[in-house]
Image (cartoon, grey):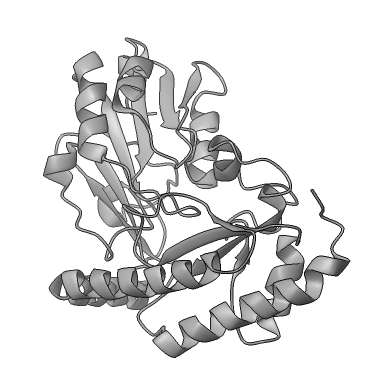
Amino acid sequence: HANRGLGSDVVISAIEHPSTVAAAKTATAERGNLAEVPVDSEGRVEAAAFGNAVTTEVAVASVVHGQPDIGTLQDVAALSRAARASRADLRLHVDAGDTAGRVPIDVRAMDCDALTIGAWPIGAPPWVGALFVREGARITPLIEGGVQEHGKRSGAEALPAIAALGFAAQAAAANLEARAARLCMLGERLIEGLLNVEDVRLNGPREDRTPGSVHVSAGDVEAETLVLALSTRGVAASPGSACTAYAGKAAPALEAIGLEPPWTQSAVLFTLGDATTEAEIDHAIASFAEVLAEFRPLSPVRR
């Protein structure tokens, strides 16, 4: 809305968070075009393709730093260079909602105009977040009526949550390397154990993924059945995507990487945190194997 003078088109990747997709569709609903840049089988956006999508009519581009379902980490700096080679005054937004506090983030290296930070990966309440806006970049308030947050967003602020985000961010920054290393170790332990179960595939890359994010598909078992059975054993997981778990359809990111039914129907997301232990990882692996052995003979999802 604030950069209509640059053009009316928007570019995003094919694996953006549903909220980003919805905002991009709204921004181009009355006029303009929305282009979705495809990804490879592991969810990576090719820099050249991203740059080629930026035409003279593109005002804004947005890319997710770490895909919230399959965990793919993008080389945002390379994507930014390619996009700005096509249009230097492009407005670039980066969605770091799933990576802040887990991997290093450098807005200068990314050369972005705005960057969204999520709270829960950092360890703060999930109903708060932060938005970095580069000095000189224009944004228009979508919620009006007051001058809170420097006139960017009206309404009373959740001060306890904001204070918690600041405290959690300081703690995460101070322990980022050790925290990320531990989550990577736990994630690899979980991946190794799950892939040792017959007919299980990892969605997304084995390397260069968001620490603590593990997404797999299990042959011949519906995700909802698998998740419910795991919950009775004390294991929490999400069917397919945490944000589209109840949409009744496959996670868009899975379709974008070329995954087809029944693999899309049997996708399960595990998210690890600071409190996760190795014993819990081992329990999750054992429970996963037990549930598959129990339900595969009864499952309506067959290949």
Q: Residue at x 19, y 70 (%)?
A: 176
Query: Is residue 120 in sight in this rendering?
Result: no
* Residue 31 locus on image (x, y percent): 52, 16
| On screen, residue 203 above or below 52 | below
Name the residue furthest bottom.
279
Residue 284 x/y as whole percent:
55, 80
Above or below residue 157? Residue 97 is: above
Locate residue 240 relative to residue 43 in the image: left or right.
Answer: right
Q: Is residue 188 visible?
A: yes
- Residue closer to the observer: 199 or 242: 199
Q: Residue at x 13, y 74 (%)?
A: 174
Q: If the image is split into quadrants, where does the N terminus sit? A: top left
Q: Is residue 116 above or below residue 259?
A: below
The residue located at (49%, 84%) in the rendering is: 282
**Foreground pick, 61 / 284:** 284
Q: Position of residue 7 (x, y in %)?
A: 36, 15
Residue located farthest toward the top when viewing the structure as drawn: 56
Residue appearing at x 20%, y 37% in the figure? 77
Residue 191 relative to residue 54: left or right: right
